[in-house]
Amino acid sequence: MKLSEVGEFGFIRRIRPGALFRPEAVVRGIGDDAAAFRPEGGRLALVTTDLLVEGIHFLREEGRFRDLGWKALAVNLSDIAAMGGEAREAFIALAVPEATPLEALEELYRGIGDLASRWQVNVLGGDTTAAPRDLVICITVYGEVAEAELLTRAGARPGDALVVTGTLGDSRAGLEILLGRARAEGEDVAALVCAHRRPVPHLAEGRFLAAAGGAVHAAIDVSDGLGADLGHLLEESGVGARLFAARLPVSQALRRFCRGLGRDPAEYAFAGGEDYVLLAAVAPEAVSALGKGFRERFGGDLAVIGEITAAGVREWIDETGSARELSAPGWDHFRKG
Amino acid sequence: MKLSEVGEFGFIRRIRPGALFRPEAVVRGIGDDAAAFRPEGGRLALVTTDLLVEGIHFLREEGRFRDLGWKALAVNLSDIAAMGGEAREAFIALAVPEATPLEALEELYRGIGDLASRWQVNVLGGDTTAAPRDLVICITVYGEVAEAELLTRAGARPGDALVVTGTLGDSRAGLEILLGRARAEGEDVAALVCAHRRPVPHLAEGRFLAAAGGAVHAAIDVSDGLGADLGHLLEESGVGARLFAARLPVSQALRRFCRGLGRDPAEYAFAGGEDYVLLAAVAPEAVSALGKGFRERFGGDLAVIGEITAAGVREWIDETGSARELSAPGWDHFRKG
């Protein structure tokens, strides 16, 4: 069935049921000029929006629309996580080429719902329109945070420990496997490809860091790649950093993948992108207790990968202990020079 | 200059200055993972998002990017107006084909700023990414309204007067002129084309209706066309309507344009679209006083164009007084049958 057979409004009627996970805050959801909802009094509002275009951010894989919906929402939830917030409401705008089967769109919404239900994020509205050629997905997420708990990219101080909330590089390896540029064995394929297709936003980890009584001075999510995102954090904070290659947390699957290719896992961890873990600058005296609490809560480690320095320093300490200049070969959609 | 020469982050640095018109509410604007701002305590949050794609919603006209920016924001502000709200913050997501000159994007932002400054709407963030072929603009607007003043599409009651806050059909005539399908004389060209390129959202009119002490039972903005948008309002309210062709407010420019073509202005008013005036259902006993207040405030008329009836009735009374069934030939991007 095509979207043209049910029309925009027929489509809205199909996606309206099951869109609300916290109906009590909602006054008007899908189907009015705008959504209307009750913010929690006294908290800051957080809004983030991400635009994904076929051929740039994703390739159309038949039968994979559910993953695409998941990921399109995940990248936004990750931005809310990086501010220390709770994600509350989502708005889904789609531009859909004529030939797209209706079932594919319903799968896309199912993938959005898979993740939205996990975090109790309501889908409150959006826009559905035609596209001449490429599928476009623009998701906006509204979240909230207490002002005292807001995490921003600014605020890192020399001496702070640099930490990440999960492993790095799997998503990039998964993408290379999907593009047929590399191979891996059995379960490693599944783990790496899943990291690319269904990243889990670190909302709980973000709340944990935000609630650390001010010990976390700055945070960002790793979407463009550790190198690039660290660069953003340093720029906004006006500081420098020193990273230790040996401390970058990588999965066993990525180690085996890299061994097969004769590549260095640290390279994937540094320049990979789409990891959707959080990178944060933490007061040095608080790192140990925070790491202990993190392990108790999440099982894994809050990995200390480096330290904040005065501005001007951008140092990479390799496995042998020798230092070189950090470059930031992350993901800028335009920059070419 | 191309976007690729300055990069995404270079571009952000260019648009950051001049993005804030009410900085006092903003904690983090452009340049972090999400925007953070202070909602006004106790009010409802309103969020709307619209996706515009080249070739579907607009044609690329060289030298007209400023108008495009204005209009892309205007369609969102109009949605906030239709809920009775104040527009507060805007988020601009763009997907940009490689060949687009940087100057065109800056013109687009200038057009957004023209309108944002008029309503003191901050531009707090967004996303800028590459597009393979077609320019995509997805704008999200956050607004607020007191819960008691919220206007929705639901709530129209039999006996209510149907009113519109401005003239209808000019935008459609302007589009036909732009596409070379029709002609008009001198100043009429400018007026009709301007109505299409630079629609003025009826935010002040929306606040006026919202503040009418509950006399306005339902509202919607006229974007898809009066016929289609009336259909949405009737469906959400579970009522019917009777429209009087002779009462549809049309400009002198549209009258002359239609005379030249041998067409009926009521047809443009009914099926045109992109008018961005508000259509509302008003308690019959309040119409006269409301219209007087409207005239004092805005100069023009709050035109009574029909009445709400019980469900099932959809009646069009033509200039001779004879009735026929109302169809709703509005704008559905997909519907074909």
Image: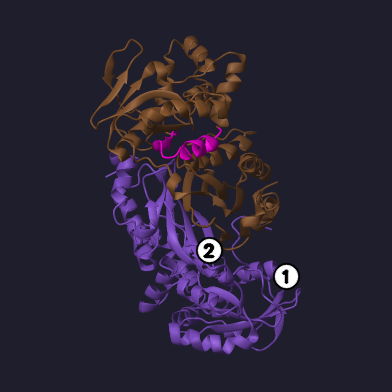
Chain colours: A brown, B purple
Residue A28 on the magenta span: no
Residue furthest out toward the left: A312
- In this rendering, position of residue A156 left or right of residue B288: left
Asked if residue B58 can be seen in this view, the reply is yes
Nearer to us in this view, B125 or B307: B125
Q: Secondary structure at mark 1?
A: loop
Q: Residues within 10 Å of mark 2 (few under 14, many from 20)?
A: some
- In this rendering, position of residue B125 left or right of residue B303: left
**Residue B272, located in which quarter of the rendered image?**
bottom right
Question: Who's the residue at 69% across and 54% down the image?
Answer: A6
Which residue type carries mark 2? Gly
Earlier-in-chain disc, 1 versus 2:
2
**Residue A99, located in which quarter of the rendered image?**
top right
Asked if residue B66 can be seen in this view, the reply is no
What residue is disc 1 on? Answer: B238
Q: Quadrant of the N terminus of chain B?
A: top left
Q: Where does residue B87 sit, x and y in percent of width and height? A: 46, 64
Report the span colored magenta.
A200-223
Q: Is label 1 or label 2 in front?
A: 2
Q: CA distance from mark 1 to mark 2?
A: 30 Å
Q: Where does residue B149 sit, x and y in percent of width and height? A: 56, 72
Question: Who's the residue at 28% across and 39% down the image?
Answer: B5
Q: Taking B110 as reference, is A284 above or below it? A: above
What residue is disc 2 on? Answer: B42
Q: Taking A200 as reference, is B139 above or below it? A: below
